[in-house]
Image: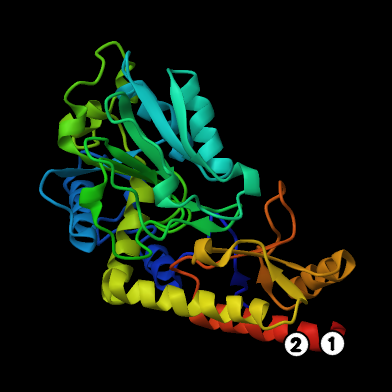
Amino acid sequence: MRIRPYNFFAGPAALPLEVIERAQAELSDFKGIGMSLMEISHRSKEYEEIHDETQQLFKELLQLPEEYKVLFLQGGASTQFSMIPMNFLVPGKIANYVMTGAWAEKAILEARKIGDVFISASGEANNYVEIPSLEDIQVYPQTAAYLHITSNETIAGTQFHSFPRIKNVPLIADMSSDILSRPLDVSQFALIYAGAQKNLGPSGVTVVLLREEIVRNIPENLPVMLKYDTFTKHNSLYNTPPVYSIYIVNLVLKWIKQHGGLVSLEKRNAEKAKLIYDAIDQSGGFYTGMVKLNSRSLMNITFKVHDDELEKLFLQQSKANHFIGLEGHRSVGHLRASTYNAVPYEACKALTDFMIDFQKRYG
């Protein structure tokens, strides 16, 4: 029997095994219709039920206020980097961004192609090992189009643990790597977006949660597929949506609900991360965390071994022991364990045991 690896990839990332097995069972014959969901019209009754149910599951799990819409878009979070300023950065206004690392930087570079950008706070001076404090975020409400944050930086391994509140300034967040990992007061945000392939499902769909009022004054001259109101008016069915990806998201949301919702997931995610952080912190310097304690992510744990050659050996032996995805991002190197919702506690315990054993053998 083939061993299922311990999957710590940063994205596309682990999916719940129950979800994969359910999808497998329904792959060729979806609910007795004799065809796969991938083969039928997105206007069909069978798909529309999936579409509407997935939106309702988001609303239920996040307790979305009535004025919020759930949209399904394509193009990943990277397309949102452009869509946001195209829709909301109007002449005479300035887009405000908190610079927390590589993904925030990509969003900023796209916004600068559209209009004026102000860096409200930055962690660049300390090499992004810490999220800027909320008190250090500078925004001038009279000129601000919006304030944009990246809630979790997958490369650096940093995470916002609370969010800024600036009166009369819409808050927009890229939550691609930590959406649905904890309870959230969505009313703080005008718009949240997330590529699915880390915590929601497979790549192919991007979820956008937005307060309806923000789409009232979108410029008319934008391409139709780059306007948020195209999707709000047509229930994300203006063109063919990524049907199968949305179906898998639907199954993931049901899995989250069955496992106690976001309160339960937050507790489990904290327990999983603590296992690995404790192995790092109690190693006497054999392992070193790469992020300051107050900014550590519960989704992406970045660390290194004190000796580069030993670190290479760690990766070799970890692969031989069925751990995959532990290489750090190519831009920073070292090690990274991504512990998203679908990564089981047992995988994190196994990694912790391996880390402790490796230190005993080579420390």
- Give the residue type at disc 2: Asp
93 up-or-down from 141: above or below: above
Picture coordinates of residue 215 (x, y %)? 20, 28
Q: Residue at x 72, y 82 (%)?
A: 283
Q: Residue at x 50, y 31 (%)?
A: 108
Quick check: 134 left or right of 277? left
Quadrant of residue 136 in the image? top left
Say which residue label 2 marks.
357
Quick check: 48 left or right of 88? left
Say which residue label 1 marks.
361
Q: Residue at x 57, y 46 (%)?
A: 123
Quick check: 280 left or right of 234? right
User: Is residue 326 visible to us here?
Assistant: yes
User: Is residue 1 visible to us here?
Assistant: no
Tags 2 and 1 touching, CB below 8 Å: yes
Quick check: 358 left or right of 16? right
Front position in the image: 306 or 225? 306
Quadrant of residue 354 in the image? bottom right
Picture coordinates of residue 159 (x, y %)? 48, 57
- Give the residue type at disc 1: Arg
38 up-or-down from 258: above or below: above
Quadrant of residue 287 in the image? bottom right
For the view shown, which residue lies furthest in the right direction?
309
Quadrant location, the N terminus:
bottom right
For the view shown, which residue lies furthest in the front direction?
135
Front position in the image: 359 or 317? 359
116 up-or-down from 68: above or below: above
Q: Secondary structure at mark 1?
A: helix
How many angstroms separate mark 2 from mark 1 (CA)?
6 Å
